[in-house]
Each structure stands twice: as structure tokens, then as C-alpha cells.
Image (tube, grey):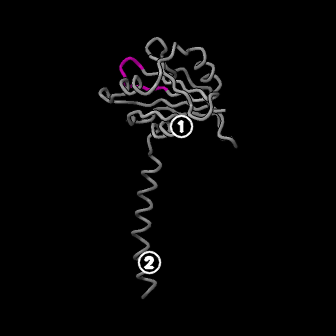
Amino acid sequence: MWKMIGGLLTLPALLVLLVLMIFWGSEDYTRLIRLNWELDLPASESCLYETDSGASFGGDGERYHVLAYVDDSGLEEALEREAEPLAPAEEAVTAILDGLSVPADQRPDFSDCRSFTAAHPTDDRNRLYLLVNSAGTRLYVVECFF
């Protein structure tokens, strides 16, 4: 009898854990941008592409994400408020994307993008490049951690 009651109580707990795992796994990458760079950007619609240089003991390496946004997301306003404008960063970004073997169709069109950056709160060697297309519907995030 007690085994049956214990089994019935375990089932709802497992369902709750399953739902939490689904939501935890589908977390928007902008949360990590907030944690790593202290930038408050609107949540993206989806992540269209992502790659990184692989796991490392110290957490160093390079990461690249392409995030999709809806037209009225407020992304451009948030970037202007939260980040610093950056002179075109095509050379530096291209070198990183080449190192990550990012295909041409997943790279930003530099002639159609505005560039931004932010200082890392704990290490000046870390670099961030944020490129937003003119429509404000794509955010290209390039991060280098040392």
C-alpha cells in the first residue's frame, strides 16, 4: 500500500522536473549576455546559428551566435542604451569567424550592420562584438574569453 502511494507521489514530482528541464534548456542566450557582459538586451525570438571553439578548463575561447528578433523588439534602442558604438569591426570579427569555420551564409553582411561592444566587468582582455542588421531583426554576437 505504501509503495503505491509513494509511486503516485513520485509521478507528479517527475513531471514537474521534466517541465523545468524543458524550460531550462530553452533559455534565451541574451540571459548569458546579461550575466557575462552586464547588458540588458531584449529576449530573442530564436537562435538561428551557434558555434564555439569547444570546452576548456578555464572557460576561455570564442563563441558565435546569430539571434533572430521581431521587427518591434526594441533591440536597436537597447543596444544604443546599453552598449558602446564601435567602428566597423569587420577584420577582427572575420578572423574569429574564420577560426570557428563559420559558413558564409551564417556570417553578417558588414555593409548592412551597425557594430557595438561592451567592456567585460572583470577582464579587459575579453572582447565582445555585437552586430545588428539595419532591419533590427538579426543580432550577431561574437565573444572572445581569455
Near mark 2 (Cα within 10 A), the count class, few <14, some 14-19 or many ≥20, is few
Q: Nearer the viewer, mark 2 or mark 1?
A: 1
The answer to whether residue 139 is above or below residue 36 is above
The secondary element bearing badge 2 is classed as helix
**Label 2 to label 1, Cα distance in Å?**
42 Å
The quadrant of the image that shows the N terminus is: bottom left
Q: Is residue 116 magenta?
A: no
User: Mark 2 or 1 closer to N-term?
Assistant: 2
Q: Position of residue 52 (x, y in %)?
A: 60, 34
Mark 2, residue position = 7
Question: In the image, is residue 135 part of the stretch drawn in magenta?
Answer: yes
Q: Name the residue at the left extreme.
A: 72
Q: Where does label 1 land, which residue? A: 36
Residue 84 relative to residue 126: left or right: left
Answer few, some or many: residues within 10 Å of disc 1's Cα (few below 14, many 20 plus, some between 14 and 19).
Answer: few
Foreground: 30 or 119? Answer: 119
- Between 97 and 82, the one nearer to me in the picture: 82
Residue 7 falls in image quadrant:
bottom left
The three-letter amino acid code for the residue at tag 1 is Asn
Magenta stretch? 133-140
Tell me which residue sits at (46%, 11%) in the image: 111
